[in-house]
Image (cartoon, helix red, strand yellow):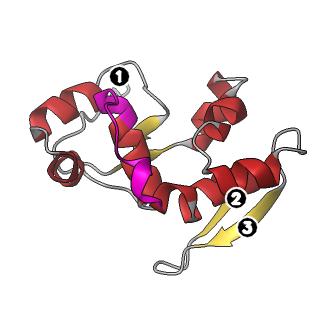
Amino acid sequence: MTPRARVLRPTLDTPFHIDFEWWQAHDRNWHLFLRQLLCPEHQEMLRSETNGSEMFDWVDPETAEVYRMDRLQYYITSHCAKQPDFLRGRYPLVERAFRLLLAHGNTPMTPRQMAEALGVPPTTLLRVLASPRVYRGIRPVLG
């Protein structure tokens, strides 16, 4: 008899991030969605481009990890998400968590950390993020 694979349920201390590979696999219009998050300056810069999908290697200055990302993701995480109005507004909880992760450069955060920043109960956020359905590509960090 072979051992059954263990499925680990995320906890309040499980780090989550935005899995952009999930976006690419599940949403053909993910670039259109991300373009809506651009600040006016970068909307103008990318106006003449079709999708901003030129890929390059980006090195995290704190961890030295190398990530593949496109220019659109880079502009959002490095500049647009850091603008004061990015986190303001009456957005649904998942949208606020998504924007928070972008504002922190998509650095993995636990539900406790996100809940503190968003002013919501951590158990509520965990219940949403740990559901079988993946919202906005927010998934637990594997490994």
Query: Quarter of the image holding residue 47?
Result: top right
Q: On the image, numbered disc 3 is attached to which residue?
A: 57
3D distance between C-alphas at marks 3 and 1:
44 Å
Q: On the image, numbered disc 2 is attached to which residue?
A: 68
Q: Is residue 93 left or right of residue 85?
A: left
Q: Nearer the viewer, residue 45 or 100?
A: 45
Q: Residue at x 25, y 48 (%)?
A: 14
Q: Residue at x 53, y 42 (%)?
A: 19
- Percent position (x, y) of residue 10? 24, 38
Is 37 drawn above or below residue 76 in the view shown?
above
First of labels 3, 2 by sequence position: 3
Q: On the image, numbered disc 1 is attached to which residue?
A: 1
- Percent position (x, y) of residue 34? 62, 38
Q: Amino acid at mark 3?
A: Asp
Circle 2/circle 1 CB separation < 8 Å: no
Which span of residues is magenta-colored? 83-95
Circle 3/circle 2 CB separation < 8 Å: yes
- Percent position (x, y) of residue 32? 70, 31
Residue 30 highlighted magenta (yes or no): no
Q: Nearer the viewer, residue 14 or 84?
A: 84
Q: Is residue 93 left or right of residue 34?
A: left
Label 2 vs label 1, nearer the camera? 2
Q: Residue at x 43, y 25 (%)?
A: 134
Secondary structure, mark 2, is: strand
Res 75 label = none
Q: Amino acid at mark 2?
A: Arg
Secondary structure, mark 3, is: strand
Q: Is residue 93 left or right of residue 20?
A: left
Q: Amino acid at mark 1?
A: Met
Task: Work out which quarter of the rendered image holds the N terminus and state it.
Answer: top left
